[in-house]
């Protein structure tokens, strides 16, 4: 009798767990599929201004990130810089419409905030990590008169989806799946995968929590349109004479340094700072060192 009751209890627990799992997945799908269409006039990116220094800097985070990515080591630089931290379209607390998420759409959304806050005045520096690094180059190419210098951290350069998948598979199966076409289905279950159990040691809690704020539409199309399909070499030729500081971890598996080194000769005023012991999240691990490199670069230039 007790055995039957035990089996019945296990059955009910499994049934409830399965229904909860399916419920989370359905909610995740609908969250993206039923999102409103992008309306440039009505939708503005979430952003924060920090610091009161004379040098203006726009900061753009990476894929699945948010403006909270940059909130490390700011006490030492907030008196030097005036910082504009932006949640990219579809990420953080910015709108997540059902849209294309191509480079033009991302850039025009950033432009709207930059113009509103006066960060298009010609004396601005733009800083980006990973996805944000690509958008940094793109925005400078589109508006070269806005910026005096660029800082690019962990720039990902890949020939196609197969190349990026092969590289990320070497990190883990999970990383490989993140660029697989089936990953959009995994995105349906983000509330489950962004629990503390899955947090990598080098990702702070607030950054990891924000990594679940996107939906499958914003993630998948941004990955496809920006990271996989952007011709970075072509953009580079448009800003080849800009002052650029590249910062890159030599152990960065998500954005291998060898592909970056291939395009460095395009730039006439580029400096490459290689960090031999660091990976893709170098800023999170060494914010003070990164800010020191940035400050030194801007003083020298």
Image: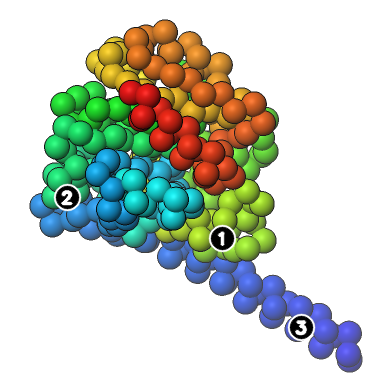
Q: What colour scheme does the image use?
A: rainbow
- The structure residue drawn at horizontal position 56% and vertical position 72%, both measured from the top left corner, is 20
Q: CA distance from mark 1 to mark 3?
A: 38 Å
Numbered label attached to residue 205: 1
Quadrant, the N terminus? bottom right
Which residue, given by chain and number where applicable, does mark 3 sit on? 8
Q: Nearer the viewer, mark 3 or mark 2?
A: 2
Whether residue 114 is visible here, answered yes or no, is yes
Residue 24: percent from the left, percent from the top? 50, 66
Earlier-in-chain disc, 1 versus 3? 3
Above or below for 153 versus 114: above
Whether residue 158 is visible here, answered yes or no, is no
Residue 26: percent from the left, percent from the top? 45, 63
Numbered label attached to residue 119: none
Residue 85: percent from the left, percent from the top? 33, 50
Query: Which element is circle 3 on?
Result: helix
Label 1 packing within 10 angstroms: few (<14), some (14-19), many (20+) = some
Could you say which is closer to the camera, residue 240 or residue 55?
55
Which residue, given by chain and number where applicable, does mark 2 sit on? 117
Q: CA distance from mark 3 to mark 2?
A: 62 Å
Q: Nearer the viewer, mark 1 or mark 3?
A: 1
Query: Which element is circle 2 on?
Result: loop
Number of numbered discs overlaid on the protein picture: 3
Residue 291: percent from the left, percent from the top? 46, 40
Quadrant, the C terminus? top left
Could you say which is closer to the camera, residue 198 or residue 243?
243
Could you say which is closer to the camera, residue 4 or residue 198?
198
Q: Residue furthest left?
A: 41
- The structure residue drawn at horizontal position 17% and vertical position 50%, both measured from the top left corner, is 117
């Amino acid at each position: 009798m007790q055995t039957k009751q035990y089996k019945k209890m296990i059955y009910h627990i499994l049934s409830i767990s399965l229904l909860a799992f399916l419920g989370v997945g359905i909610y995740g799908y609908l969250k993206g599929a039923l999102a409103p269409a992008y309306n440039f006039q009505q939708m503005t990116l979430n952003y924060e201004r920090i610091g009161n220094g004379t040098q203006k800097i726009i900061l753009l985070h990476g894929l699945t990130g948010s403006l909270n990515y940059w909130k490390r080591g700011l006490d030492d630089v907030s008196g030097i810089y005036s910082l504009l931290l932006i949640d990219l379209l579809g990420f953080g607390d910015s709108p997540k419409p059902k849209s294309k998420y191509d480079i033009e759409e991302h850039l025009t959304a950033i432009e709207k905030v930059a113009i509103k806050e006066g960060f298009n005045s010609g004396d601005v520096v733009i800083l980006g990590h990973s996805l944000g690094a690509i958008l940094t180059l793109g925005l400078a190419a589109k508006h070269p008169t806005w910026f005096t210098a660029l800082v690019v951290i962990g720039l990902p350069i890949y020939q196609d989806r197969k190349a990026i998948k092969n590289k990320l598979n070497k990190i883990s199966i999970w990383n490989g799946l993140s660029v697989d076409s089936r990953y959009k289905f995994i995105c349906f279950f983000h509330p489950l995968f962004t629990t503390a159990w899955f947090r990598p040691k080098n990702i702070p809690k607030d950054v990891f929590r924000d990594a679940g704020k996107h939906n499958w539409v914003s993630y998948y199309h941004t990955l496809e349109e920006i990271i996989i399909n952007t011709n970075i070499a072509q953009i580079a030729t448009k800003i080849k004479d800009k002052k650029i500081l590249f910062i890159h971890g030599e152990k960065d598996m998500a954005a291998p340094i060898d592909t970056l080194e291939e395009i460095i000769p395009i730039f006439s005023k580029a400096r490459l700072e290689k960090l031999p012991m660091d990976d893709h999240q170098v800023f999170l691990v060494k914010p003070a060192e990164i800010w020191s490199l940035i400050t030194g670069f801007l003083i020298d230039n």
